[in-house]
Image: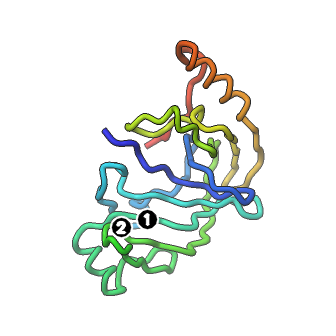
Amino acid sequence: MTAQASDSVLCRDQEFSLTGWEGAGLFEPGQYGLHPVQVSTGNWLGYICTYAVSDNVLRLERLEIGFGADDRAAARRGEGPPLFGVRPRLTEQDSYALYEHLDQAIAFSGTLTLGADFVWDTYVHMGFHPPWKHRVVWDLTFEAGKLVGATDRSADMARMREAEASGGLAGLFKPLTPTP
């Protein structure tokens, strides 16, 4: 099993990994006629989003997506399926198509858990890494895409790492998990 690439969120001039969420309204390619294809064992979903919080609004800035042969060939010709008026370009490896500079408001309602400064001693080569494996952790709460609250969870995560180092986290934390 392979560690999975996480979506990222740019916030307060820092890049965070999206380590979990509760709520609804994050970007889903199928809602826009895109059909991601897994092209790496490190990306089961077939796509990776980069969001940004700008002027207290959640925005989709970039999409990296695996395409099937037909969509990949169309992207190579500059005719790939448009997303928010933007056509994709292929990466140098020809594995993923990139949609960049999207600047599309996302009407997410719920809480995003963001992590930065990954603790490499906790690395496991499988699945998505939970929030406690980061030194800097924030919960951001949104209503219809507007930021309405932010809670620094870094101290909580430090306690969880200490608990894990001394015998395990069982019962200490119920991590936020992605909803399908």
Residue 154, located in which quarter of the rendered image? top right
Residue at 70%, 27% (x, y): give it: 156
Measured from the top left, where is residue 30 in percent x and y? 39, 60
How would you rate the neighbour count of disc 1 (Cα within 10 Å): few for under 14, some for 14-19, many for 20 or more? many
Position of 76 relative to 141 (above/below): below
Q: Is residue 40 left or right of residue 51?
A: left
Identity of the amino acid at label 2? Tyr
Residue 162, located in which quarter of the rendered image? top right
Q: Foreground: 27 or 77?
A: 77
How would you rate the neighbour count of disc 2 (Cα within 10 Å): few for under 14, some for 14-19, many for 20 or more? many
Give me the disc on residue 136: none
Residue 50, located in which quarter of the rendered image? bottom right
Position of 91 relative to 168 (above/below): below
Residue at 43%, 65% (x, y): give it: 64
Secondary structure under tag 2 reads strand
Position of 148 relative to 122 (above/below): below
Whichever of callouts 1 and 2 sits on the residue coming sooner in the sequence is: 1
Q: Foreground: 42 or 63?
A: 42
Q: Are marks 1 and 2 in contact (CB under 8 Å)?
A: yes
Measured from the top left, where is residue 10 in percent x and y? 65, 58
Q: Please identify the quadrant where the N terminus is shown.
A: top left
Secondary structure under tag 1 reads strand
Q: Label 2, on which residue?
A: 96
Measured from the top left, where is residue 152 in percent x and y? 75, 38
Give me the disc on residue 64: 1
Measured from the top left, where is residue 36 in percent x and y? 34, 60
Identity of the amino acid at label 1? Glu
